[in-house]
Image (tube, coloured by chain):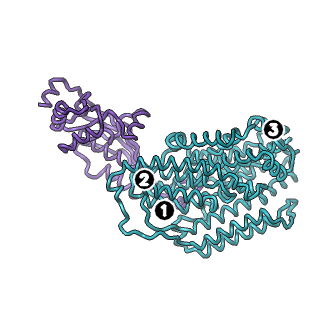
Amino acid sequence: MADLGSQLPVWSAVPFAGILLSIALFPLLAPRFWHHHYPKISLGWGLLLAIPFLTVYRREAVYEILHVALADYLPFLVLLGTLFTIGGGIYIRGSLRGTPWVNLAILAVGTFLASWIGTTGAAMVLIRPLLRANAHRRYKTHTVVFFMFLVANIGGSLTPLGDPPLFLGFLRGVPFFWTFSLAFEMIVVAGLVLASYLAVDSVLWRREEKTVRAWTPENPERLGIEGAHNLLFLAGVLAAVIVSGVWHPGEVTFFGVHLGIQNLVRDVVLIGLLLGSWLTTNRETHTKNGYSWGPIQEVAILFAAIFATIIPVLAMLRAGEAGAMAGLIRSVQTPAQFFWATGVLSSFLDNAPTYLTFLTTALGRLYPGMPEREAIQHLIAEHDHFLMAISTGAVFMGANTYLGNAPNFMVKSIAEEAGVEMPSFFGYIFRYVVPFLIPTFLLATWIFFF
Amino acid sequence: MRWYELMIEGDGEALEALLAASPGDEIYGRDLRLAESSFTDRVLEFLHAQSHHILFVSAPRAGALVRSLREDDSDLNLEWIREVVGGRFRFKAEAYNRDVAKAIRDALTVNLPAGISCLDFLKEENDPEARGIELFTPVHDYVFKASGTIEGVPPGILEMSRRLTRLDFVQEEPLELETREVSEDGLTFLAS
C-alpha cells in the first residue's frame, strides 16, 4: 500500500473531489436534478476511478477496492442503517410549551442523546417535539438552527456511534472509549453554544406577543415515548460495537482481505437488531417520524462512490512525504491547524471522508509507512492532541454549513415543511455560524489546541 | 386621505406612551420592509434600543401627533415629515407547507386594499417521489411559488407591506416610497 501511495499521481484524487463536490453543490445548484439522478452521478465518479485503477494496478486495485468495501463501507452502512431504523422507531409524544428553558432542555437532552443514537437518529427523534413545542411562536428559526448545531453535530462527539467520522476511526483502530476523552471539549463547546441559545431565545421570547407568551396547549397530552422497546435494541447496538472493539477471536480471509471475526459477528448482530426493530415497531410510529428506507439508500449509493474514490487519496497520504500529497502533509503541522483544516473542509464536504483524509494525513506525517492500526495506537499514546483536533474538527464543524453533516439538510427540510422559515445557505453562515459558532471554536482552539 | 411619514427621535417607550394616549391608525416603519438597515441599527433594533422611529399616519393623526410633539415635554422630537403619495415593492415567496402557502395566497389575493395591484406569477408543484426524509438529496414534495410587484397608494401599499413582512417564506424587496416634502406652512396647517 505504501508503494501504491508513492506511485499514484495527484490527479487520481479527482474522482474523490468530484463526488464530494457533487454532494456539496448539486443540492444547492440543481436540487431536483440531483434528487433524481444522484445514483448515476455517483456511479460515474466511481467508474472514473475504478476503470483506470483496475486497468493499471489490476490485482492490487481489486484488493484495495474489496478491502475498503468489506472493512469500511459495509460496517459503516450497517451501523448507520441500524441506528437510523432504531431511532426512527422512537417517537416522543406529548405537549410541550416552547419557552426558553423548555427549548434549552430539549437541546441539552438531544445533545446528550446524539452520542448514543447518532446525530441523525437524535435529530429525527427530537426535531418534531421541538417544532410542536414552538409552533405557536413567531421567533423559532434560531431554535432550529441551534438544534442543528448541537443535536445534529456537536452532541455526536462522545462515542463512535455519535457521528460517522468517529465510527470510521473506530473501524480503523481507535478504541471505543477513547472518544470519551473528548468529553471536556464537548462540554465546553456545547455549554457555550447552549448559553448563547438561552441568551438569544430569552431576548426573542420577550419580543413575542403576550398571547404567545401566555399560550398553553388546549388539550395537553402527557409526555411519553412510543416504541420505547427500541431503547433495548439501542443497548444491543452499543454492546455489539463495544464487544467488537475488545474481543479478538481471530481472522478470516476473503479474497485476500483479512477480516476480524468480531467485526463480522458485530455486523450480523447489528443487522439482526435492525430487523428486530423494524419488525417489532408499529408502522404508525415510523410514519410519524417520517422514517423510510430512502435515507439508507442514499447513504448506500453515495458512500459506495466515496469509499471507492477515497482509495488513492488515502494511499497517497499514507505514503507521507513520498506520496503526491506531500504538500498537504507539510502544510498541516500542529493540532490547531488540524482542528481548523479538518473543520473547514468538514464544513463544506461530508465530514466522514474528511476525517479519514486528515487522520491519514497525521499518520502519514508522524508515522509514514507504518501499518495503520499500529500507527493509530502510537498516535493516541504519543500525540493524542492530533486525534482530538481531527475528531472535534470533523464533528463540531459539520455544523458550519448545511453541507457539513447529513442530518443538517434533514432538519432544515423537516422544519421548512412544518412551516418554519430557514435561512438561506449564506444566511445560515453569516447570521448564525459567524456570530455564535466561530468565536466558540476560536476559544476552543485557544483552550485545547495551543 | 393624505398620508405622512414622520421621523421621530427619542425614547421608544415614550413614543409608545404618547401614541397610546389616543389610539389611531399609525403604522411603524419597523413593521414594514423599508431600506436595508445598517448592522448597528439591526443590533439596536434587536435590543429595542433604537433612538429613531419611523411612523406612517393619516393626515388627521399626523396633525394631532405634530401638535402633541410640540407640546410634549418629553425628549421626543420630530426630525422630519413627508407626504407619502405612493409606493411599490417586489416580492418573492416559496413555501413547502400547504397552510403557509394558503396564508401567503390569502394575503396576496383576499381583501386587497383599495388601489392596490399585485401578483405576476403563482404556481404549485407536487413531486410525490420527494416525500419523506432525505439526507443528501433534499427536495420538497410540495412547493408553492409566487412573485410579483405590489403597487399602490397609502394606506393600502403600507398595509400590503406590513402583511407580507409578517409572513414567513416571503422575501420582499425594500418598499420604495414616492414622497413629497412638507413645507413649513404645510406643517403649520397640518398642526392647526
| Residue A74 rendering spot, x and y as whole percentages | 74, 61
| Residue B51 rendering spot, x and y as whole percentages | 33, 33
Name the amino acid, label 2: Phe
Name the amino acid, label 1: Pro
Disc 2 from disc 1: Cα separation:
25 Å
Do we see residue A247 in this rendering?
yes
Labels 3 and 2 touching (C-beta < 8 A): no
Q: Which chain is cyan?
A: A
Observer-nearest residue: A129 or A256? A129
Residue that badge 1 annotates: A129
Residue drawn at 76 percent across, 57 percent down: A175
Disc 1 from disc 3: Cα separation:
50 Å
Secondary element at image label 3: loop
Question: Dot 3 falls on which chain?
Answer: A
Disc 3 from disc 2: Cα separation:
50 Å
Tally the marks: 3
Residue that badge 3 annotates: A324
Residue drawn at 42 percent across, 33 percent down: B40
**Image hue for chain B:** purple
| Residue A136 rendering spot, x and y as whole percentages | 38, 57
